Image: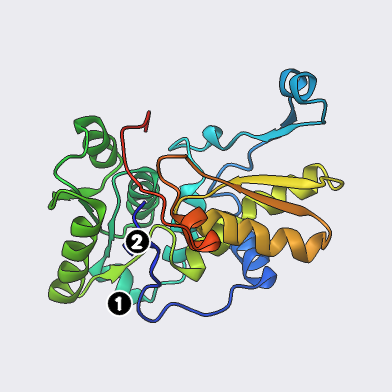
């Protein structure tokens, strides 16, 4: 994730509340998998702590991104639904948006960088998304998606910088704290920040003393640079 990708989208809401996350949970209930939270004997033995894992890989598209994508689409007007939505993504957001868009009868266009692996394109098209390849990076694909948004009258749904999307992602923490109410720490992956902000918002509302730890890849540490006012270089090959 680049520094540019962390800049707020035009018109983005300034505040995300726990009520938004609770409303999202009611809105998406039954349409996404209520995934289990399991105790890990192996990780608990290794760390000396009681470790619980949230199995979001049980979602149809194998990722939590469905939650935010669906929550955002369910709040579209009839005209917005008819015209369709667009996003820039080469990852799980594209599949979550395409899968639920197809299920709801909402046309979905996904702009991906030309460097995107063929398997990602095929997975998105397999669940009903229309893929447009443009640019060599996420930022270039994002710029083209914004251009098509205006030209075609589509609604842009950002992978993370959208309060509706973040509220949907926050339902992960809501379920975890329902399953294990005495959790003391949440270790949350940080990419763009949608999952972390949604989970953190509702978790602190439920359990004010809970500790929140954001975890990101060493090669792509935009959030670390932002919070620490650091300038460590970003980039390189990863398993992703």
Where residue 48 sits: x, y (%)? 82, 25
Whether residue 40 is visible:
yes
Label 2 crowding class (10 Å Cα cut-off): few <14, some 14-19, many 20+? some
- The correct choice, above or below, for 206 with respect to 50 in the image is below
> Which image quadrant is residue 201 in?
bottom right
The one nearer the camera, 157 or 130, is 157
Q: Is any atom of residue 28 visible in this view? A: no
Residue at image position (55%, 54%) is: 195
Residue 213, percent across and down?
66, 49
Q: Position of residue 174 (x, y in %)?
A: 71, 54
Compared with 197, 82 (above or below) is below
Q: Secondary structure at mark 1?
A: helix
Give the camera-side residue of 237 and 166: 237
* 163 sits left or right of 155 in the view: right
* Spot occupied by residue 106 in the image (x, y as percentages of width and height): 31, 60
Q: Is residue 19 left or right of residue 96?
A: right
- Residue carrying label 2: 5
Name the mark on residue 79.
1
Picture quadrant where residue 159 is located: bottom left
Please name the residue shown 63% across and 64% down the image.
21
* Residue drawn at the location 75% of the way across and 20% of the way down: 46
Q: Could you tell whether 34 is left or right of 50 in the image? A: left
Image quadrant for the C terminus? top left
């Amino acid at each position: 994730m680049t520094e540019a990708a962390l800049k707020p989208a035009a018109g983005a809401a300034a505040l995300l509340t726990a009520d938004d996350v609770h409303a999202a949970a009611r809105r998406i209930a039954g349409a996404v998998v209520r995934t289990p939270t399991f105790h890990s004997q192996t990780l608990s033995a290794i760390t000396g702590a009681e470790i619980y894992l949230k199995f979001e890989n049980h979602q149809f598209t194998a990722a939590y991104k469905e939650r935010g994508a669906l929550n955002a689409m369910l709040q579209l007007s009839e005209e917005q639904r008819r015209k369709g939505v667009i996003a820039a993504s080469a990852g799980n957001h594209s599949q979550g948006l395409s899968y639920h868009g197809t299920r709801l009868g909402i046309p979905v266009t996904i702009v991906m960088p030309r460097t995107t692996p063929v398997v990602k394109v095929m997975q998105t098209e397999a669940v009903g998304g229309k893929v447009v390849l443009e640019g060599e990076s996420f930022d270039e694909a994002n710029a083209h998606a914004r251009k098509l948004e205006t030209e075609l009258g589509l609604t842009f749904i950002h992978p993370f910088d959208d309060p509706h999307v973040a509220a949907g992602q926050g339902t992960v923490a809501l379920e975890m704290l329902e399953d294990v109410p005495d959790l003391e720490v949440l270790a949350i992956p940080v990419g763009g920040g949608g999952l972390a902000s949604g989970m953190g918002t509702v978790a602190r509302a439920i359990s004010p003393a809970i500790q929140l730890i954001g975890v990101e890849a060493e090669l792509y540490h935009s959030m670390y640079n932002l919070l620490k006012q650091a300038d460590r270089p970003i980039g390189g090959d990863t398993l992703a």
